[in-house]
Amino acid sequence: MAGISHAIRACATASRRSLSAASAAALPKEAAAAEVRAAAAATGRKWREREDGRRVQWVFLGCPGVGKGTYASRLSQLLDVPHIATGDLVREALASPGPFSKQLAEIVNHGKLVSDEIIINLLSRRLEEGEEKGELGFILDGFPRTIRQAEILEGVTDIDLVINLKLQEEALLAKCLGRRMCSQCGGNFNVASIDIEGENGGPRMCMPPLLPPPQCESKLITRADDTEEVVKERLRVYHDLSEPVEEFYKARGKLLEFNLPGGIPESWPKLLQALNIEDPDNERSAAA
Ligand SMILES: Nc1ncnc2c1ncn2[C@@H]1O[C@H](COP(=O)(O)OP(=O)(O)O)[C@@H](O)[C@H]1O
């Protein structure tokens, strides 16, 4: 993926109109869901066979709290590609002192999106570092989140597959409010115990808490943007600005919709199955 970081920067400065025109011209006909599943299966095989030395270039979409980070990180380990979460890049920038982090905090802690320019800058820098280390492929999590970001990405590289994780809104709020991180080891946990009626007569949704080990218990922190008011705003912003990105990829035949059936032990094997990927250590890793 040499050069993506430079191309992405250059594209971000090009006019929005020319980018839209270029990507609309390249638009294939809307593909059926079955074709997307076949493409996902082919991508899974490509990964296993690695004939061309290529690694996957995947994107994770989904509402705040759906579990993009959890599943993207697991897949990145399995597929041996970096998991690049723009939310993590933003939080790293927030943690460094100075006026820039103050400016970011004003935006992030109110549940708004930071500007496309800022996010492209952070992402290009991360991709540059990866290129220097010889990284191949990626799983992007939290990017693209606006149509403009999707157009920019489309203009600089081929995305093989976009996985759209879905969960009931009630569960999303509970999961965000239950999210905890260990300030020492960086481990992610969730204290929420979710047991809700299925939507439209669907099956009950049960997700047990993912509790920290005793050594982390006293060091748990909550994200400043995981308050009820801010999570509701983030969900609103997602519906307004990010949901159209799902349509963008659906129209290009790249979107794989995945309804999470429950917690990690239930969902992980089913996600691997949908992607036609065999986890050599499935039993153990599903339970972890
Ligand atoms: N692609 C992006 N574009 C704009 N802002 C972003 C992007 N990615 C992350 N952010 C900012 O970082 C915050 C945290 O991101 P993330 O951890 O991905 O949140 P979430 O849990 O809501 O999916 C977002 O609310 C937003 O302010």
Image (spheres, rainbow, N blue to C red):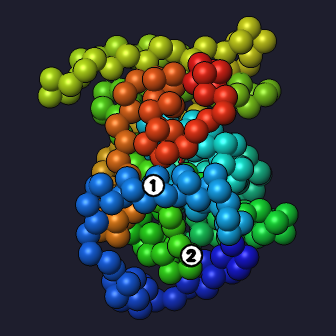
Mark 2 Cβ and ligand 1 under 8 Å apart? no
Q: Does residue 5 appear in this view?
A: no
Residue 263, above or below 7:
above
Label 1 Cα neighbours within 10 Å, binned few <14 / some 14-19 / many ≥20: many
* In-image side of 22 versus 95 (left or right): left
Quadrant housing residue 262: top left
Give me the residue at 64% from left, 52% from top: 48
Whether the residues at callouts 2 and 1 have beta carbons within 8 Å, the answer is no
Numbered disc total: 2
* In-image side of 82 versus 140 (left or right): right
Disc 2 on helix, strand or loop? Answer: loop
Residue at mark 2? 157
Look at label 1 and name its amino acid: Ala
Residue 197, above or below 29:
above
Q: Does residue 210 appear in this view?
A: yes
Residue 279, above or below 110:
above
Whole-percent x, y for residue 146 in the image: 41, 64
Q: Nearer the viewer, residue 135 or 62?
A: 135
Query: Which-is-in-front pick, marks 2 and 1?
Result: 1
Give me the residue at 30% from left, 33% from top: 169
Residue at mark 1? 40
Work out how far the residue at label 2 is from the one at label 1, CA to CA, in angstroms: 18 Å
Look at label 2 and name its amino acid: Thr
For the N terminus, the quadrant is bottom right
Label 2 Cα neighbours within 10 Å, binned few <14 / some 14-19 / many ≥20: some
* In-image side of 261 versus 80 (left or right): left
Whole-percent x, y for residue 20 in the image: 37, 84
Give the mark, 2 or 1, whose residue is nearer the N terminus.
Answer: 1
- Mark carried by residue 282: none
Whole-percent x, y for residue 19 in the image: 43, 86
Task: Pick out the residue farthest to the right.
Answer: 133
Give me the residue at 80% from left, 27% from top: 184
